Amino acid sequence: MISRFITLLLLISLVWAVPSYADDFTIGYLQLERDARYSKKQSFARYLLGSLGRPYAGAEVALQESKFHGSGIGATFKLELVKGKDSAALLSSIKEMNAKGVQFFLLDLPADAVNEIASATKGQNLLLFNVSAREDRLRQEQCQAHLLHIIPNYAMLSDALAQYLVFRKWKEILVLSGQSPDDVEFNQSFKRSAKRYGLDIDEDRPFVLGSDPRQRDQNNISLLTADADYDVIFVADTKGEFARGVPYASIKPQLVVGAEGLAAVAWHWAWERHGAPQLESRFEEKADRPMRDADWAAWMAVKAIAEAVQRTQSRDFAVLSKHLHSEELVLDGFKGNRLNFRPWDNQLRQPLLLATHNWVVERAPLDGFLHQTNNLDALGFDKPESKCKF
Amino acid sequence: MRKTLSHRVFLASLLSACTLPVYAKGTGYLFISSEKDNNITVLDGKTYEVVKRIGTEARPRHLQFNADKTQIYAAAGDGNAIDVIDVAKLELVDRIGEIDDPELFDLSADGKTMYISLEEDGALGILNLDEYFAKREGKPDLKVAEAAPEGDSSEAEDDAADNAEEDDSSSKKKEDDALPGMTTVEVGEEPEGILVSPDGKTAYVTSEVANTVHVVDTASKEIKANIVVGNRPRRFALTPDQKELWVSNELSGSVSIIDPATHKLTETINFLPPSFRSEDVTPVGITLSKDGKTAVVALGRANHVAFVDVPSRKVTDYVLVGKRAWNTTLNKDDSLLFVVNGLSDDISIIDMKSRKVLKSVPIARVPHTVLVDD
């Protein structure tokens, strides 16, 4: 009797569960109402690593490309954009949406918010895609099994840059370093790469913004670049406001890399191979501006979910999650290589572009920089270096 | 040179005057499109010397003969046009304009219908050529794009400029209706490879971003089936018995074999030349021999072409060619294979019997397709 009653209850709950699933395959997209990274003032700096606007348009372009991916299981992909005041507000949105069957979420959030949300949702049946936080710690100590990173982290960027400098034999480096936590992280990451690839950092000189004559040794670029023997200047500046003033202002006629001059990026509008101009033009049509790293990452995240649905012909969370985490996954990032996630820290393997403001000079990993299993793992944290424990 | 030319023209007209079959003996010439020099290089089929370079609209890519091989159609992607080249005169003689970024196309067996993958629109374009030419008034201005200056190769920039210009023209185009004779079928984004069945009833279109082969009924203009293949499907080849449709998957490094009767994926062939890693294998060009026994697949960044024994599906040889080998063409008697190397600006000529490269010939910047007039 009781078992029959339970069966009946189960049947009722199944019938009830159907409408919330419907034919839609909804992907959550979370952002903060106010995010300093997208303030007009900051995007005005237009520095190479920065954003030119919110990356949501990238996800929309991916949706447009995924019209057929769900057709086999009768699913249509949808995006649900949620703007929250803070992590707590976003967490309650995730809970609500998850109860309705949403299991995949893009996080366009700063590192701390990503960490808070990932920690609070640990063990639940959902997957999070980090599309804009580059911080190494999210892939190391703060890593989570259900948090996948699309945007390349600082270690990947600095490894790509270091490969290029070694390839050109520009090995003596002067570092100009900002003091914000992000700048410090970018700088530490470059130092790790310098050691890894054999670059010499002659000196690391901290800079400050401003024109206070009492701080001129730290705010005047001529003074900052004088009396040192170097081939290139690496500027560790994650805002770009200082970095953009360095080219053509140094004492010696030297090139600038890092945040300005030549930077390692995930995407660049001038990349012309592997169908990139078509993607770029689809994005520009949607967003009315060039595509940048986070835009590409939001696009790639939706594409990854669609790819998993198409390949597995399933909407079962366990099946999709398994495929996304597997080395069988093949993602097309319009950068030439097959992309998938590193099993040890869930970072997306990918080539990076070494770009100036209007050209892609090289694609990393550069020829000749090899890795025993996958050359893409020459960029960023390789398995032996990983501090991630899921 | 001119002498031989007019001689050939004379010979051709003499032959047709004798009401011999229309398939007169070809000129023997090779025609190769160059995406960045905006021209078609004509090579002598014996000496491989350059006979002429025929200027076209910007970024010529796919080339195909009309039914009686008197004309070549050339898809000029950035020029938004399909140019028409006269084979006897070696001249640009006409143009089908206002086609948004054409890359690949195929012709029906009678040569009267053109099937075009319209990348920007995510659509298959079906163009009735008789209707188009009948309704079109006069000949378009046959201006020729200049070769992009040395070092200036930012296509994305060109595209941006093009798009800015098109904003006006595309809205105008909508008012004026589409091209005469053109109908479209919406498919996945970035349609690429295209093949029309010999009976003209079915068009197969790959969608690079949807990892799908769309099967389109050409009469009803409806999608009959969507077949999931590997990642970034690029080119087709149909076996002579029409029982197998081969599709190259650039990113998966494989070829998918489809049964056209059931629309099912039946087999997948993977490639790995010695000392390469699977991620270097990016197949695009695919050509089947006329006896249906041998398939040749160009492996892109792996700089090799693979020879596949069709009955056993075994890869029997890998032949080293130039950088980023992509489109492939066999000559009439299947004795020579021409492989276009997109990143070394040349073609490799392979003897099919010995499977050795006989010669590599410099062409122009970013060569795309070879046609053989034999």
Image (tube, coloured by chain):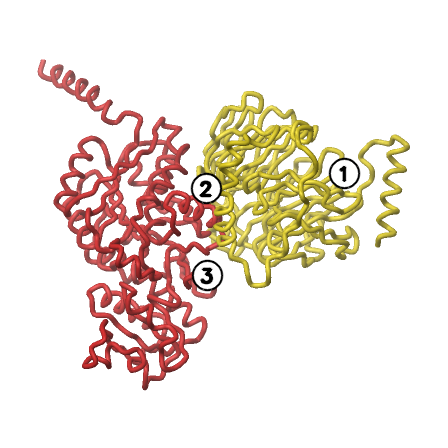
Chain colours: A red, B yellow
- Looking at the figure, which quarter contains the N terminus of chain A? top left
Q: Are marks 1 and 2 in contact (CB under 8 Å)?
A: no
Q: Secondary structure at mark 2?
A: loop
Residue, x 67% and y 59% (percent of image)?
B362
Q: Secondary structure at mark 3?
A: loop
> Which picture quadrant has residue B17?
top right
Q: State whether residue B187 is above or below residue B232.
A: above
Disc 3 target residue: A359
What's under tag 2, amino acid-wise? Asn
Gap between marks 1 and 3, in whole Å? 42 Å
What's under tag 1, amino acid-wise? Thr
Gap between marks 2 and 3, in whole Å? 28 Å
Q: State whether residue B372 is above or below residue A42.
A: above
Q: Are marks 2 and 3 on the same chain?
A: no
Disc 1 target residue: B70
Q: Chain of mark 3?
A: A
Q: State whether residue B323 is above or below residue B226.
A: below
- Percent position of residue B294, x then y: 65, 40
Disc 2 target residue: B231
